[in-house]
Amino acid sequence: MSLYIIPECYANKGVGELVKESIGNEFKGKVHVIHKKWFGRDRVLKEILKLIKTLKSDYVIAIIDYEEGLYRRYIDVIRSGKLKDLSCTEEGNIDSTLIIRCGSRLKLIIFDSNIEHVLLRYDKELESNPMKYKGEKAEREIIKLYEKNTKFKEYLCSLVNIVTRNLT
């Protein structure tokens, strides 16, 4: 049995790596973070649907941004359409982050409206440096924030507690 964590962007990959590190001790199986530089929200959603169909006993966690405006509606359409058969229910909501369970093997971590919106609560430098969590360096910046900011570490621990609930 394996757990696949599929983040949308480099910043979400940083969160994914921290989730993997935290879950590693609790999950009885291998934990993989799958991220490709061409991933975006649409491709992540396609990837998770493919994994759920092909990997019959494994678990998947997708880490995506809710976005704003018309792009936000896309997540709602996916939840009511392609994911409808999986009976999605909200398991928690902390600091503008939704945790949604779809069926028994899929969880969605959705940053509302995006990860930068959430990070702004923990890193005021983001106001003057909006590119801090963009591109390949974002993963490294997320890990540095986790190591130096107690509040962000507490937030992530709360997030992991909700995500790992009922994940067996």
Image: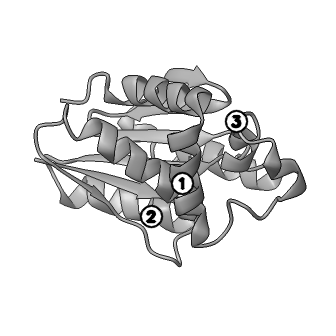
| Amino acid type at mark 1 | Asn
Whether residue 115 is situated above or below residue 163 in the rendered picture = below
Which residue matches tag 3?
A: 122
Marks 3 and 1 close (CB-CB < 8 Å): no
Q: Position of residue 117 (x, y in %)?
A: 75, 43
Which residue matches tag 1?
A: 12
Q: Nearer the viewer, mark 2 or mark 1?
A: 1
**Where, by quadrant of the figure, is residue 132 drawn?**
bottom right
Whether residue 131 is situated above or below residue 71 in the rendered picture = below
Viewer-proximal residue, 44 or 152?
A: 152
Q: Is residue 70 left or right of residue 152?
A: right
Determine the residue located farthest toward the bottom in the rendered image: 38
Mark 3–mark 1 distance (CA, rounded to whole Å): 15 Å
Nearer the N terminus, badge 3 or badge 1? Answer: 1
Nearer the N terminus, badge 3 or badge 2? Answer: 2
Is residue 9 in view from this perspective? no
Q: Position of residue 47 (x, y in %)?
A: 39, 64
| Amino acid type at mark 3 | Tyr
Q: Position of residue 60 (x, y in %)?
A: 31, 48
Residue visible at 70% across and 36% down in the picture = 122
Residue visible at 47% across and 29% down in the picture = 159
Mark 2–mark 1 distance (CA, rounded to whole Å): 17 Å
Whether residue 164 is situated above or below residue 133 in the rendered picture = above
